[in-house]
Amino acid sequence: MNITAVARRARVSTATVSRTMNDSGRVLPKTAERVRKAIAELGFHPDINARALGSGRSSLYGLIISDITNPFFPELVRAFEDIAVKHQKEILIANTGYDPKRLDICVNRMVQRRVDGVAIMTSEMDETLLKGLQTRKIPLVLLDRHAQGPGVSSVRIDHAAGMLQAVEHLVALGHSDIGFIRGPVSLATARVRYKAFQDACKRHRVRVTARCIAQGDHGVEGGYKAMQDLLKKGAGLTAVLCSNDLTAIGAMETIYEQGLRVPEDISVVGYDDILLSAYTRPGLTTVNVPREQVASAAFLSLLSYGQGADLNLPGQEHILVPKLVCRRSTARPSAGTLEEESTRGA
């Protein structure tokens, strides 16, 4: 079975079949539908490697993520793959484990496979690698970074808005002693979230001191240990906001081990809204980072270059606003806690 047989069945030229399979956008919708029907009827499976050599395009897109063990990223991968399948494209997934050296290896794999574009959903991007991909005229889309140069798009999350919603929620409930478990200092996204927390607290005149800040690692164990540190400091916190959901889940385990309750003694807020957060006990109040929108914006930005967008022009910039999701891990400070605070202030 070959492309000629498909062309005969669909009553079009082989060039039209090729353009339809490459989703070039230069085929009338009715004609493209006829070609796809012929492909399905004949059970035609094009040789991707041969097509890449002949056209310079592979219909393969690279997706690089930081941590496959963090549920946020598999959920992002699924959303990215779903939209890729709808456009009859394939994806090559790579996981860096937050290791810049592995990132280098991942990028080289993408280049060798002649990908049509790369979505880099990680914050440890090396500028040299970025320029190397640009030199090879490979379209890029970056997460939480400003688009830089031709052919480079970006999808940025408005973390300032997300953290502000979380802090405003706690303040509205009556919390004034709010702790924060931050992510790794080495990660740009973690630094941005911490800065956003500080700015939100300043805006609402919530005092932030060293006693109410603990260092986590964006994992459950890191949140568990960081919450222990906060309790040892004796800061009298009534609420804790975490840099991500895994941190919050670990923090809640420590709270329970210490004989305290969520939210009666300490309210807990996460960030990301991974699927698991709805099934913790109690359900975790968190800030939803819309993975479907991130994946869609990233994929469509890359796809646009296969549909005629000029690689010599700056790429697209998408700014997405997170949304607070209120569940049962937050509540007003208990009467006992408020009385203790009043006594301390007397």
Image: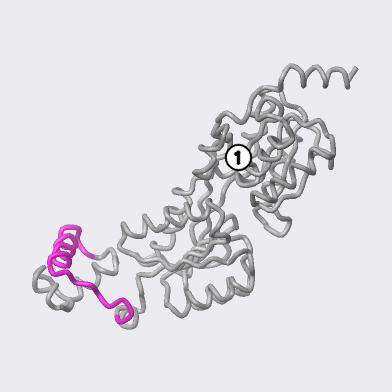
Mark 1: secondary structure: helix
Q: How is the image coloured?
A: one colour
For residue 180, which quarter of the picture? top right
User: Is 56 on the left or on the right of 193, as rendered?
Assistant: left
Residue designated by label 1: 162
Q: Magenta includes 49?
A: yes
Give the quarter of the figure containing the C terminus: top right
Image vertical order of residue 1 relative to residue 345, above or below? below
x and y, in percent, of residue 166 in the image = 63, 34
Q: Nearer the viewer, residue 9 or 74?
A: 74
Q: Nearer the viewer, residue 73 or 253?
A: 253
Crowd around label 1: few <14 · some 14–19 · many ≥20 (10 Å): many
x and y, in percent, of residue 18 in the image = 23, 73
User: Is 216 on the left or on the right of 4, as rendered?
Assistant: right
x and y, in percent, of residue 181 in the image = 72, 44
For residue 236, which quarter of the picture? top right
User: Is 100 on the left or on the right of 143, as rendered?
Assistant: right
| Residue numbers of the magenta segment | 27-50
Query: What secondary structure is the stretch in magenta mostly built from?
Result: helix
